[in-house]
Amino acid sequence: MTSIVWSLYKYLFYHCIPSRKFQFCRSRKPALFFLRLSRFDFHFRRTPQFLNQMDTSNPSVFVNAELLRLYVGRRVRAVIQVQSEGNGVIYGKSTDDNQITVKGSPPFTLSKFVEVIGIADTDKSIRADVWTNFGDSFDTSTFNQLCQLANGEFKPLFV
């Protein structure tokens, strides 16, 4: 369970903090990372300015291809490995090794791994609003575990 929690922290704080202020902590020891993270938590999470910046009006659910069918018509968030693209459609492999089709035009050149946030059109496609490049290497099994935990026993923790 400890490795899953550590993986969850790594995903959330490396990829979900918009300001990415703690990117320099990646190369340091985990203890220093958590020390700096706790300072960030203490200082910013409790200020009204930070709370006002958070958009909780339209939350997105962490999904893989298997879980996508449960959220058709709702806002979802998925990571795909881009396999091909053309005519406003991106074909990719989800973190659970199933095919996902993403509709929409990304505003930039895509890397190998991309996070998309949008509305689930069907059980295998997403109409994307937000695109985020995750680079050429990404731990898909960790994100897959995150999806399962966020839709399973820890569902109340996710907005």
Image (cartoon, rainbow, N blue to C red):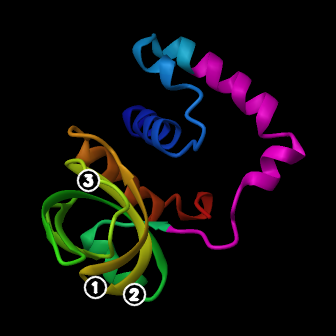
Magenta part of the protein: which range?
Answer: 34-60
Q: Earlier in the sequence, mark 3 or mark 1?
A: 3
Is 72 rendered above or below residue 36? below
Residue 43 horizontal/vertical position (percent): 80, 29
Name the side, left or right, on which 103 lies relative to 5.
left
Find the residue positioned furthest to the right.
48
Instruction: Sort mark 3 into few (<14), some (14-19) or many (20+) by Cα contacts within 10 Å.
Output: some
Determine which residue is flagged by label 1: 123
Tell me the amino acid under the disc marked 1. Asp
Q: Label 3 sits on what residue type?
A: Leu
5 drawn magenta: no
Separation of marks 1 and 2 at Cα, in angstroms: 6 Å
Instruction: Where is residue 35? Give x, y as percent.
Output: 63, 16
Q: How crowded is mark 1: few (under 14 residues within 10 Å), some or many (20 or more)?
A: some
Spatial separation of the CA atoms under disc 3 and disc 1: 23 Å
Identify the image quadrant of residue 129. bottom left
Mark 2 — residue? 72
Q: In the image, is residue 51 above or below residue 38?
A: below
Give x and y (percent) for residue 143. 33, 50
* Secondary structure found at label 1: loop
Q: Which residue occupies 59% across, 28% down?
A: 21
The residue beneath circle 3 is 110
User: Observer-nearest residue: 27 or 156?
Assistant: 27
Q: Which residue is drawn at 50% across and 43% down?
A: 12
Q: Quadrant of residue 71?
A: bottom left
Quick one: quadrant of the C terminus? bottom right
Image marks 3 and 1: residues in contact by CB distance under 8 Å: no
